[in-house]
Amino acid sequence: MAYESSIVLSRTVKKRRRATLFTLLLLIGPAFIVFTLFVIVPVLQAAEYSLFRWNGLGPLTHFYGLRNFGFLLRDIIFQKALLHNMLIIVFSLLVELPLALLLAMIVGRGKFKLAVFFRTFFFLPFVLSEVITGVLWQFIYNPQYGLINSIISFFSPGNPGIAPLGSPTGVFWAILIVIIWKYFGLHMTIYIAGLQGIPVELEEAARIDGASNAQVIRHIVLPLLATTIQITVFFSIIGSFQIFDIVWAMGRGDPVNGAETMVTYLYKFGFQRFNMGYGSSVAVAIFVICLVFSIVYQRLLLREQRG
């Protein structure tokens, strides 16, 4: 009897495992197929194309090896584009995220009547598409009838004004302002969601014990908001490597590659100049940078959580 019971039990366990496996395949299978077709396959194809000198038409016949990557590392324009992406990351971390956190604490925890209005107001730039944002700011920066020069002319009649999108040294900083204006509302909303998960009683208890507002923020709010901050840092850095639409809509990275980014560089060489092999090497470089950062960042977070 004991032997027969063990057989029945093992069969029941196997059936449950099969049912669980079938359920997992049923739920994960479609998503895995889509991920394979639209992520894994294109990445592998780009890696293959990067090894050839190919214009995007016809078969792959001219094997180039790693020479595309060698040209890429020596190209001054690519180095300039990489520097611009790094500067976007730096200003996103030092300006955009602190600004978003500050506004989140004001409008997210504020008890004034217009708090909801300001939340919507600050979030609206993110709702606009990148192309519309670029075109809108082109009008704002216009040297003849733009908003900025109209204000300058009002306060300083006869002043010729500025043309930031026509300056090789000023175009990047003009677009950087637009990028910060565009995306800080998203991070602000994420911070507001994180702040709502912090019990107000903790802050009130700390104030009763004599803690100042700065001490409450430093020792209570920020530690409890650490996971949310880590998420926004990750999104901000990965998104900074993928900046394209706004830059392209506001001048295609010109004049004189003054606002070139890695993705605009990829588009120019891969699609405009029909050098798909070289463009694919740029895509592989961007993918490797993002992948390495994601792995290192997640390992550091896991190590910090375990410690």
Image: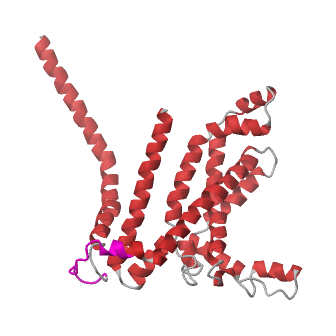
Residue at (36, 66) in percent of width and height: 284
The residue shown at (68%, 80%) is 164
Relative horizontal placement of residue 300, taking residue 24 as reference (left or right): right
Q: Above or below — where is 243 with respect to 259?
A: above
Residue 229 vs 69, above or below: the answer is: above
Q: Residue furthest front?
A: 74
Place of residue 142 in the rendered image (x, y in percent of width and height, measured from the top left): 70, 83
Horizontal side of 2 relative to 97 (left or right) equals left
| Residue nearest the observer in this picture, 23 or 190 | 190
Could you say which quadrant of the image residue 171 lies in? bottom right
Q: Check if residue 92 falls in the magenta segment.
A: no
* Range shown magenta: 56-71
Q: Judge whether residue 59 is colored magenta.
A: yes
- Where is residue 108 shown, x and y percent of the image? 71, 47
Tell me which residue sits at (76%, 40%) in the image: 214
Report x, y in % for residue 297: 47, 48
- Which colour style is shown? secondary structure
Quarter in which the N terminus is drawn: top left
Say whether residue 96 is left or right of residue 117. left
- Could you tell me if residue 120 is visible in this image? yes
Q: Can I make out residue 197 in this image?
A: no
Q: Quadrant of residue 156?
A: bottom right
What residue appears at the point 22 percent right and 77 percent down from the top-left corner? 63
